[in-house]
Amino acid sequence: MFFHKQELQFKSSPSKPDPAYAKRMQEILGGQYGEITVAMQYGFQAWNSHLPGKYRDLLFGIGAEEFGHVEMIATMIAQLLESAPVEQSEAAMAKDPVLAAVVGGTDIQAAVVAGAGVRPVDSNGNPWQGSYITASGNLLADVIANANAEMQGRIQVARIYNMTDDHGVREMLSFLLARDTAHQNQWTAAAEELQAEGVEELPIPSNFPLSKEQKAEEYKFINFSDGAAAREGSWAQGPTPDGKGEFTYLDGPDSSVPFPPPTQPDERFYGTTPKPNLVEKAAGVVKDTLSKK
Amino acid sequence: MFFHKQELQFKSSPSKPDPAYAKRMQEILGGQYGEITVAMQYGFQAWNSHLPGKYRDLLFGIGAEEFGHVEMIATMIAQLLESAPVEQSEAAMAKDPVLAAVVGGTDIQAAVVAGAGVRPVDSNGNPWQGSYITASGNLLADVIANANAEMQGRIQVARIYNMTDDHGVREMLSFLLARDTAHQNQWTAAAEELQAEGVEELPIPSNFPLSKEQKAEEYKFINFSDGAAAREGSWAQGPTPDGKGEFTYLDGPDSSVPFPPPTQPDERFYGTTPKPNLVEKAAGVVKDTLSKK
Amino acid sequence: MFFHKQELQFKSSPSKPDPAYAKRMQEILGGQYGEITVAMQYGFQAWNSHLPGKYRDLLFGIGAEEFGHVEMIATMIAQLLESAPVEQSEAAMAKDPVLAAVVGGTDIQAAVVAGAGVRPVDSNGNPWQGSYITASGNLLADVIANANAEMQGRIQVARIYNMTDDHGVREMLSFLLARDTAHQNQWTAAAEELQAEGVEELPIPSNFPLSKEQKAEEYKFINFSDGAAAREGSWAQGPTPDGKGEFTYLDGPDSSVPFPPPTQPDERFYGTTPKPNLVEKAAGVVKDTLSKK
Amino acid sequence: MFFHKQELQFKSSPSKPDPAYAKRMQEILGGQYGEITVAMQYGFQAWNSHLPGKYRDLLFGIGAEEFGHVEMIATMIAQLLESAPVEQSEAAMAKDPVLAAVVGGTDIQAAVVAGAGVRPVDSNGNPWQGSYITASGNLLADVIANANAEMQGRIQVARIYNMTDDHGVREMLSFLLARDTAHQNQWTAAAEELQAEGVEELPIPSNFPLSKEQKAEEYKFINFSDGAAAREGSWAQGPTPDGKGEFTYLDGPDSSVPFPPPTQPDERFYGTTPKPNLVEKAAGVVKDTLSKK
Amino acid sequence: MFFHKQELQFKSSPSKPDPAYAKRMQEILGGQYGEITVAMQYGFQAWNSHLPGKYRDLLFGIGAEEFGHVEMIATMIAQLLESAPVEQSEAAMAKDPVLAAVVGGTDIQAAVVAGAGVRPVDSNGNPWQGSYITASGNLLADVIANANAEMQGRIQVARIYNMTDDHGVREMLSFLLARDTAHQNQWTAAAEELQAEGVEELPIPSNFPLSKEQKAEEYKFINFSDGAAAREGSWAQGPTPDGKGEFTYLDGPDSSVPFPPPTQPDERFYGTTPKPNLVEKAAGVVKDTLSKK
Amino acid sequence: MFFHKQELQFKSSPSKPDPAYAKRMQEILGGQYGEITVAMQYGFQAWNSHLPGKYRDLLFGIGAEEFGHVEMIATMIAQLLESAPVEQSEAAMAKDPVLAAVVGGTDIQAAVVAGAGVRPVDSNGNPWQGSYITASGNLLADVIANANAEMQGRIQVARIYNMTDDHGVREMLSFLLARDTAHQNQWTAAAEELQAEGVEELPIPSNFPLSKEQKAEEYKFINFSDGAAAREGSWAQGPTPDGKGEFTYLDGPDSSVPFPPPTQPDERFYGTTPKPNLVEKAAGVVKDTLSKK
């Protein structure tokens, strides 16, 4: 259960409205790595958790904070939109360059759909969608996904911090940056603890049984491009991070197979299938191709 | 530039067709963490790269391999679909339970749209979309995003491995599992190298200037849920993974502020704004609310 | 701020797992009118509210309950998925009709993506999206939208209630049906109170100034189809629900205008525009058309 | 069947082109509550109707009018776009502030994709989608959904009315506002008639059999937030709008249950499941949690 | 304006319901190339037309027929769904293989959302979307797009024709196949007439001024794959279909340029940019790369 | 397999950055008819091909070139974004009209999400999606779809060519225009060759068996609009392009049938079905309707 309190974790009021800036801020609310994503992601991971105890508590504990961040940002955006202009015709903009700048930078649907209000969309107006979240049921993979989300999210907050000089906005974004630091570290700590406790290990999933043939492919760096510097990195030589092998470098694939023959589904799918004379020609081509190897 | 060769990196032919299984395999082709995602993700990161040299070469080198994996899986799925049934009515299924099972498990659009062919969609038929990829321009964040993608992707390959007994399918999936091990390790190695070389460090972005107030918030674990075990983890005490602080534990937020007053946009947005008598009532409520604090 | 408690408002455990049924239940979680929609809708309406006091409190009070319903249903679905089968090949299904039925009815991504877990999607696997919510800033319109959402949602809960005999599932759905009754009534009561207090009235928005010409069009029922019974309803005669007019019936439009002439944008858009001889012909056609009137 | 006539129900020509304003107008054509939505919604409701006669005739009669409104608005937008500028580089905009304003406010795809043409998208360029419509088969629910759609739609028309001074545009919008008044009233009248005739009643669906336990939950207002004013409304006391009960007020849930134990799906999903020592710890936690109650 | 008549162009009733087949039929209603697409496509092309006269009349004339086809198919699907089963649990399906087959093949949302009704979605449940249509304003391109749509659409109708034995369904599909033949031919005829009249010619757009350098690239077939047979086709030799050149064959690109140097945006985007020592290394790499050429 | 070379087919560098123009260019990268679409489309057609030999080689040969075009345009866009401004507040824009123009015209997510980087989206920020491609398995239909894609794509390149004066940009676009000419012609040549060789013929699919009744409908032009000029075209008289019939003209449908009776699904779907007295009324209406015919 969730209980709501009509307070905010941190002050979320701009010094003055700025509807164009409101549009930029939508990204950290309803974007791929916005607060709705992390709130939902941690929630679904907790609901899918197969382990009771500290890890699930961690998911719930941060998850509920993120729902509060959704609210903080939503409240801020609504205030930034308070001066959203009604008049948006070419004639009006032509007369007033400031209006033109504001109108050109403001989300139209914030005005027309929400009446100068915040919406669950990103900075380009794409609606938030459930496919943004990650919740696989594998805890090690998922806390790394969470660290990833906090990293991308923190970059975006830092970027929009620089897009304004508004003191109130910057204060709230500073607070979010600090909390994102905390969460980046906390998910990373959880990833380390899961491994230290032997719950999971790398590579993920760690308990998949491997054959000897597979093992031969596991630590090759195969360069499918022609960048010579790729062999200089620690990914092309030396021990592997999972502690189970040594990287080797290949300047392209060391084996390959010819294409399988084309498929021949039921003719009632009306696909184009070989007619006798074409089959003959095709057979010739295939033979030629094979004989070249 | 990309050059194509009519060969595959590994044999991609099923022992026999299985159109229901083809639908499961679509996930690792066109899903959130399928091969189209990683191929595109590494490509866009390379095209956006601000650094020439080994890191960009790494992105191109693995990226082009992934385009080949797109092709390997697509070719496999097309063959699995070769026996896709045309007859799909209730009457036909009622007569033949095997047909019913196949039809119930097969992607309809693979039959109707592609004529027993593969499509750039996931296992539920959702089309692949550009919002699946991550490419922020911050290399450390992005290679961690890549490790994350390989982890989630490898879990999915392992899951569908167990969904079939087909030898040909399992062989190709084993190969992919091995390559995913390699790539998981390679992106992780790159993340470590970026830090070792001082190019980037944690938290991401590491060069954002922090105030003292922010710093106070950076390492708190604030529990917004009531799970007592959350305080037992390494995320609630001890040094932080970025090596810059110590975690502390809070049993809820240690500060808060009241909601800002509601917004009053232009009345031509036809939002519901206070009428005189309502304002009076509202003022009373706000006063009451504030006096309770 | 939101605070989470590791308890549920009502018992949410099935008598036994049923992964096919889990897929049906996704509709009331992540569908157009599922719990995520109402939780988010009431939240965004509250954050956009221009009025402090009882109406906003109402939005927050029910909104937070709905986030708890998201959790209740998510928890139930995760349990229904507990027996999700791994083996999903045609061969396995051909051997076991029960397996075939389960596999044919189960969400593939619940297995492959979430490891037998719940996801923020509808019963066809479409991800939840922000465009499902309604929050216009006009309170009367919005509480009617809320009543609408509760009505459609309650129909869906009633439908899936009948799709199972599981006692645990039915108990939880009964609880939800009862709460949906409450909320249907509460939003309807709020709509009435807003009008009784004179905050808003019908038609929405009520404060748009109307000209005399407009008024003439306001209460016509114009029948653009040939269904004779349409004139029998109370929408074609008698007083209008907003208390401001009388309906009249028309058997089709009582006026019309010719199409405006085609547009002629800049030729660098490479659209097909009239060439001299075509213009002549076209002029003839337009003249003919006009002279027929 | 639909028959088309090359005339419009009302004059749809702007005084002069205004491509930036054209983008605003896209909302009422291809947005969530635009004309495509209502045209399609009434059509699908009619095609799904289980009742012949006046209600279906009503759906067809208004539905076909809405297809004509799609055309009216599309024709208007195409004319507004007639002066869409080709030159859209930074240099050109830097030289000419009016051009900058127009370019900043104009839909790029209207120019690049449609050659200065109208498209089935909203004012942010999101394509119209089938998930906007509501058609449940329950007539009372559906006509209320229609009233809701007309209300939200009318608000949006009123908002964009104020965004321009163009006489031709305002005239057409006035006409649409008047027709939306008519339709708001007509759907409301139909909702009343369905109840008066005993076809359906509130709550929807009205014929779901309720147990005594359910009934106890049906009229509670449970406040999950801390807004004290929520108890003052008619939704927290007095008779309910469906005429079947009395509202009561609760300051939070009056009962709850502990979380069910975590799920344990097949280990081949590679989820993180308890290891022996973790199970012991977890058991301790659960015991603690339970004993705290 | 559109006028509706409560009749159908052709009989649209199945011999008996078949809800699994209904799902297949959704593709030709709400899929990428379904009837909603063509109805909307021809409508938007007409509304965007820059030419009055026969071509626009053609668009309107066929477009309105297609809206009627939307209705015919919708009506058929609603009837196919008439026996949609309510009971959809694993237990029920395990008892009854026929039920299992039906449930496994039926669209869940047709039951839960629409109450056994048709919806504007494709056969996988993806909602129809505005991005399916093509309307560029260039008439020759657009009528070819229309021919393309009719071709893909007719293939799909032919495929689902074979998926059932139902006489009523097959009759209606036969009628649609015949009308699709007509429309394929009509759009093709219009494409020829546009060229014969000199309104437009190939390549599209034909009035773009070409430089001599461009012309050199216009008729090369450059083979970026290693398929030897590609040179045998009429696309690699002989006159070009636009009558303006001769094809030539190249076994790969005949020129190329090195990558441009990486970008260096504002550092406040927190991208990873060269640090001094990295720049040196990078410079070395670039030099090496260039010297290899 | 795909192999990558760190070179470009043509020089892709702007004379100077222009982030607003970058947004326009996104259309030809990630739009419905952008390079990602054609690269993927030709790839999936090849992987689904049922014919070995020259046609599949053609698909692979052009497909791989298009992946290189994706890279060329992506590289160009990244460079155009190099000067993307960080400061995007209303205050900053009000001070500097040039900044306002740039900010108003620039993709926000290019800045906030990608750090001044390119993304797989269109010019309105909609992510690329798999549903843009066409790959039916019928070669004749598919190469015509390819010609269609090249035509629409070339129009868009021509349009954005005129939107800038930048020499570097125009050079690259000229190169793309020329290659699009080649591809338009090559797909058209392939369509002709498929027919000349007797592999496929019109109408598509050509091998569907037709009854005599169907044939009667195959070449009618039925005008569902009132445009008199529609009968003047070659689509309304004379031989049909498939060489199999003669067009005839009808001024509306020459037959029709009444609507089938409404459906009566299981009452547990809670749809609104006839109650006795309503049934009587309805029967009367139906009788009236029928008797009018």
Image (spheres, coloured by chain):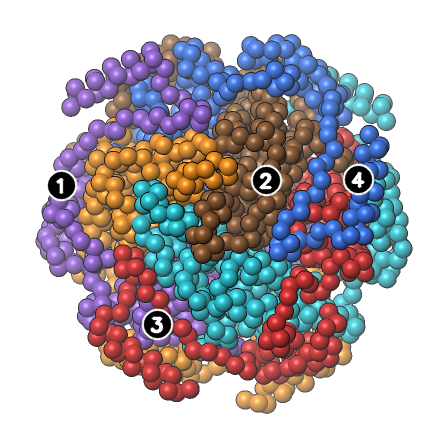
Chain colours: A blue, B brown, C orange, D purple, E cyan, F red
- The subunit letter for the residue under badge 1 reads D
Of circles 2 and 3, the one toward us is 2
Q: Measured along the vertical axis of the image, is residue B163 above or below residue A16? A: above
What residue lies at 42% left-to-right and 57% top-to-bottom? E19
Name the element at disc 4. helix
Q: Within 10 angstroms of label 3, few (less than 14), some, or many (20 or more) residues?
A: many
Q: Position of residue B262 (x, y in %)?
A: 30, 45
Name the element at disc 1. strand
CB under 8 Å between callouts 4 and 3?
no
- The subunit letter for the residue under badge 2 reads B
What residue lies at 36% left-to-right and 56% top-to-bottom? E84
The dot on residue B17 is 2
Q: Within 10 angstroms of label 1, few (less than 14), some, or many (20 or more) residues?
A: some
Name the element at disc 3. helix
Residue type indicated by callout 2? Pro
Q: Within 10 angstroms of label 2, few (less than 14), some, or many (20 or more) residues?
A: many
**Which is nearer the eye, F163 or B91?**
B91
CB under 8 Å between callouts 1 and 2?
no
- The residue that mark 1 highlights is D250
Q: CA distance from mark 3 to mark 1?
A: 42 Å
- The residue that mark 4 highlights is A286
